[in-house]
Image (spheres, grey):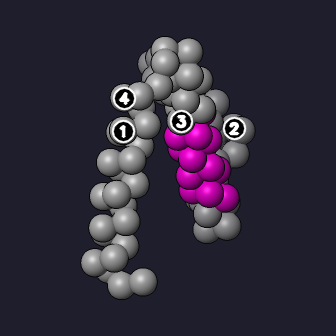
Amino acid sequence: MNVKELIMSMVDIRQELQDFISQEDDKSLKRFYKMAKAYMEQRREDKLMAEAEEDIKEGRIHSQQDVKDLIKSWTE
């Protein structure tokens, strides 16, 4: 599949999703929304976890005492 075909298929998918959404009843639409929202939240959490794992691998970590000292400095 070349780039042009991929782009066209994404345009087609977006259009089909819009058509699907516009034809659904309220109950189904609410379920679809909840599902899509949960999916996006999971993707966000997965990204945060991957970033945290990378920080750990690269040694970008703080001890518990470092964190306590940082929090204490906020109130001084």
Q: Is residue 75 magenta?
A: no
Amino acid carrying mark 4 in the image: Ser
x%, y% of residue 60?
59, 58
> From the viewer's perspective, is residue 23 above or below residue 52?
above
Residue 70 at least partly seen: no
Question: Mark 3 falls on what kind of element?
Answer: helix
What is the quadrant of residue 68 in the picture?
A: top right
At 53% from the left and 40% from the top, the residue drawn is 40
Q: CA distance from mark 2 to mark 3?
A: 40 Å
Q: Is label 4 in contact with label 1 (beta carbons under 8 Å)?
A: yes
> Which of the labelled discs sits on residue 65, or is there none?
2
Amino acid carrying mark 1 in the image: Asp
Task: Please give left or right for residue 60 compared with residue 23 in the image.
Answer: right
Q: CA distance from mark 4 to mark 1?
A: 5 Å
Q: Which residue is mark 3?
A: 36
At 61% from the left and 68% from the top, the residue drawn is 58
Q: What is the magenta range? A: 38-53
x%, y% of residue 34?
57, 26
Q: CA distance from mark 2 to mark 4?
A: 54 Å
Q: Which residue is mark 1?
A: 19
| Quadrant in which the N terminus appears | bottom left
Earlier sequence position, callout 3 versus callout 1: 1
Amino acid carrying mark 3 in the image: Ala
